Image (tube, grey):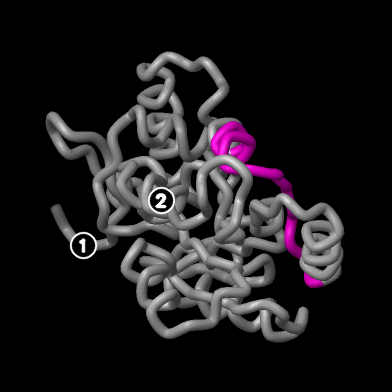
Amino acid sequence: MSARQILIVEDERPIREMIAFGLRRAGFEVIEAEDSRAARARIADRRPDLLLVDWMLPDVSGLELTRALKKDKDTRDVPIILLTARAEEQDKISGLDGGADDYVTKPFSPRELLARINAVLRRTGSTSPDEVVEAGGLALDVAGHRVTVGEQTVPLGPTEYRLLSFFMTHPERVYTRSQLLDRVWGGNVYVEERTVDVHIRRLRKALEAFGCDQFIQTVRGAGYRFSTRPV
């Protein structure tokens, strides 16, 4: 599995590159956007794990972008950290009320920003690159790109791995086929919804030998969810 991906939305190139350099050194995958319009295009291509958004953008403000993303069902659970030189208490309240998960005032140190990012990712349930996610006897090794049950490796194709990885890091929540297509395949990839069903069947078949196929549950008329609880 790839590293956690962070989208930096900042119109000042030197600042954007400085932040990107520090994040890459910390093991994150980084994509960049110079304004809100470019940010939306990057998100449509692949939903990031976290956004760093500058308040003062040249088209739509970072606060307005944050509000819009938090109102959209496909992006509302993506954590967002606002970056701004506005340090007044009311500005911070406006940012947090607008949906931001945290607020970092400029100037900030790379260490402080990294600590804030890691704290938000932990708080919102996103996994770090070296994390092992466990559920019902299944162990997902993020760094090793491997799923095991005890000492045995579960043989999975790349799409089935991505599906299971998404399910295990978002348990107990029902996702429609279209949502799974967006989260697992990406927003700019054309795949028919029935393709999801095909890969769900393959995933269940791979898990069946380990007695874990029942974790992938069909919710009639709604979609699928991952749960270790009995249906």
From the top left corner, tell me how far across and down residue 115 is, in percent: 64, 83
- Depth check, front residue: 1 or 117: 117
Rendered residue at 39%/33% (across/down): 200
Query: Residue 186 in the image: x percent, y percent?
Result: 54, 32
Q: Describe residue 115's horizontal placement relative to residue 99 as left or right.
A: right
Asked if residue 86 shows in the view, the reply is yes
- Quarter of the image for residue 181 reads top left
Identify the magenta region. 26-42
- Amino acid on which the number 2 mark rests in the picture: Phe
Residue type at mark 1: give it.
Arg
**Percent x, y for residue 95?**
42, 68
Q: Which residue is drawn at the image coordinates 49% and 17% (left, top)? A: 191
Q: Quadrant of residue 38?
A: top right
- Can I make out residue 53 in this image? no
Question: Mark 1 vs mark 2: which is more N-terminal?
Answer: 2
Which residue in the protein does label 1 denote?
229
**Nearer the observer, disc 1 or disc 2?**
2
Other residues around mark 1 within 10 Å, as few (<14) / some (14–19) / many (≥20): few
Residue at x 47%, y 62% (from the top left corner):
79
Whether residue 46 is situated above or below residue 56 in the rendered picture: above
Q: Residues within 10 Å of mark 2 (few under 14, many from 20)?
A: many
Q: Which residue is mark 2?
A: 167
Instruction: Say what secondary structure mark 2 lies in.
Output: helix
Query: Is 27 part of what is drawn in magenta?
Result: yes
